Image (cartoon, helix red, strand yellow):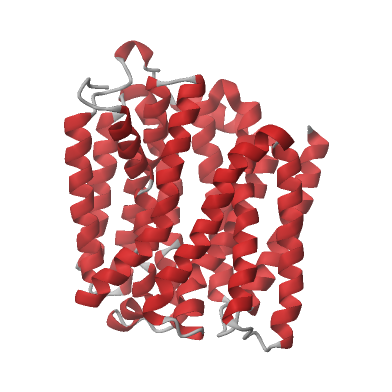
């Protein structure tokens, strides 16, 4: 790290690199309806595909860029990822049909995977132990703000321009990040610390992760709960903007829900030291599932149109439990993989997303003008997660 780069600037830079995928997802949410109309998407629910397609690119990119950066250095692949992200942004910016939009979104996700996964490795290169934990905690504090602010950014752009300008802003932001990163941070992985890239070693590590019942059990659990959350992401603009008529107020409600999840992640750092990951995960998934089943009854009795205050109360409580689950399930999945932590993290992150994408897409595509499909999805995936956790603990 150059002497001119302060610790505060380093933390902010890492946080910005890490949160690029979240920005690309959440800033687009207010533009769903406008994109669907302009690109003549035949079915309203199909506009949701701009989210899972980005996650697909992100999942594949994690598997590619993480191992490559261990062999040839961090900076070249962060540069490459940012360039791919800019290419995807440009394709979506000038898209004349929905297929080109989806191609651009896939490339955005693929490119954003590089700064997302490699920035964590950069911290690991420079720091360890409590210092690393402290830096990652501060980074997460910045990261938590992005889902709360990004929809406001997107809505602000829409007040003065079309959805094309949101993709234009992605291009500008990516260029600024590239210049900032290039000028202020040196290569952190020295030549003597690099590992020779080998497809056979990568395959061996992959087989080890996939054959580890505990690691895969927690990875599947993480994917199931992430699938429920992705189902909400996919359908949130239609539910909040259109069904509840929030319109331009959508970012404020979405941001409040995002802060609930973030607050739980922040609190989890303290609770986990006292109660442990397994107990917190068990309690959280039980509450999440019971809330979903209870609210499903409430929603059904009101024809899937409960008052907004009831929906927001339910989602605030649910996302608080999700915030407890995300960090703990990923950490539990990584516990048996300490000797292959780098590749293990890439595989666990990618696999959990690949589990989640079809589940979240199914929930979103089931939207029928009520919140019942989403609530059913939450309940079913909550039950499956609870059963998977129970099976996984039996393997320990």
Task: Name the residue: 30% across, 38% down.
Answer: 13
Task: Name the residue: 35% across, 34% down.
Answer: 11
Q: Is residue 213 visible?
A: no
Q: Is residue 103 left or right of residue 175?
A: right
Task: Name the residue: 58% across, 72% down.
Answer: 312
Indicate the quadrant where residue 278 lies: top right
Task: Where is residue 195? Give x, y as percent.
Answer: 40, 17
Task: Where is residue 166? Give x, y as percent.
Answer: 25, 65
Q: Is residue 335 above or below residue 291?
A: above
Q: Is residue 94 above or below residue 372?
A: above
Q: Is residue 361 visible?
A: yes
Task: Where is residue 47? Give x, y as percent.
Answer: 41, 74
Q: Is residue 233 left or right of residue 157?
A: right
Q: Is residue 112 left or right of residue 45?
A: left
| Residue nearest the viewer, comparing 314 with 285 | 314
Q: Is residue 248 left or right of residue 199?
A: left
């Amino acid at each position: 790290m150059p002497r001119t780069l302060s610790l505060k600037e380093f933390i902010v830079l890492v946080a910005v690199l890490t949160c690029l995928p979240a920005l690309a997802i959440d800033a687009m949410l207010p533009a769903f309806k406008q994109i669907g109309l302009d690109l003549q998407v035949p079915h309203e629910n199909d506009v949701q595909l701009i989210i899972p397609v980005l996650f697909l690119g992100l999942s594949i990119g994690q598997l590619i860029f993480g191992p490559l950066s261990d062999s040839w250095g961090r900076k070249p692949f962060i540069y490459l990822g940012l360039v791919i992200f800019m290419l995807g942004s440009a394709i979506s910016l000038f898209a004349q049909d929905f297929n080109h939009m989806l191609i651009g979104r896939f490339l955005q996700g693929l490119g954003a995977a590089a700064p997302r996964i490699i920035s964590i490795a950069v911290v690991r290169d420079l720091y360890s132990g409590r210092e690393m934990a402290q830096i990652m905690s501060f980074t997460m504090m910045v990261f938590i703000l992005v889902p709360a602010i990004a929809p406001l950014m997107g809505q602000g752009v829409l007040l003065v321009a079309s959805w094309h300008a949101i993709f234009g802003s992605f291009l500008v932001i990516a260029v600024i990040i590239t210049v900032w990163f290039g000028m202020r941070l040196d290569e952190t992985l020295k030549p003597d610390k690099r590992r020779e890239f080998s497809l056979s070693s990568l395959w061996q590590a992959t087989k080890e992760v996939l054959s580890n019942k505990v690691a895969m059990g927690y990875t599947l659990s993480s994917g199931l709960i992430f699938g429920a959350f992705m189902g909400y992401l996919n359908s949130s603009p239609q539910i909040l903007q259109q069904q509840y008529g929030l319109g331009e107020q959508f970012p404020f409600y979405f941001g409040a829900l995002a802060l609930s999840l973030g607050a739980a992640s922040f609190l989890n750092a303290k609770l986990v030291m006292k109660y442990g990951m397994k107990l917190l995960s068990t309690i959280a998934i039980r509450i999440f599932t019971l809330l979903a089943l209870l609210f499903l009854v409430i929603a059904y009795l009101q024809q899937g149109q409960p008052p907004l205050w009831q929906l927001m109360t339910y989602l605030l409580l649910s996302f608080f439990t999700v915030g407890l689950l995300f960090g703990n399930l990923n950490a539990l999945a990584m516990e048996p993989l300490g000797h292959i932590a780098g590749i293990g993290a890439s595989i666990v992150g990618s696999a959990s997303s690949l589990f989640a994408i079809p589940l979240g897409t199914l929930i979103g595509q089931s939207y029928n003008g009520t919140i019942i499909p989403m609530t059913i999805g939450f309940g079913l995936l909550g039950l499956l997660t609870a059963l998977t956790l129970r099976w996984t603990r039996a393997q320990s």
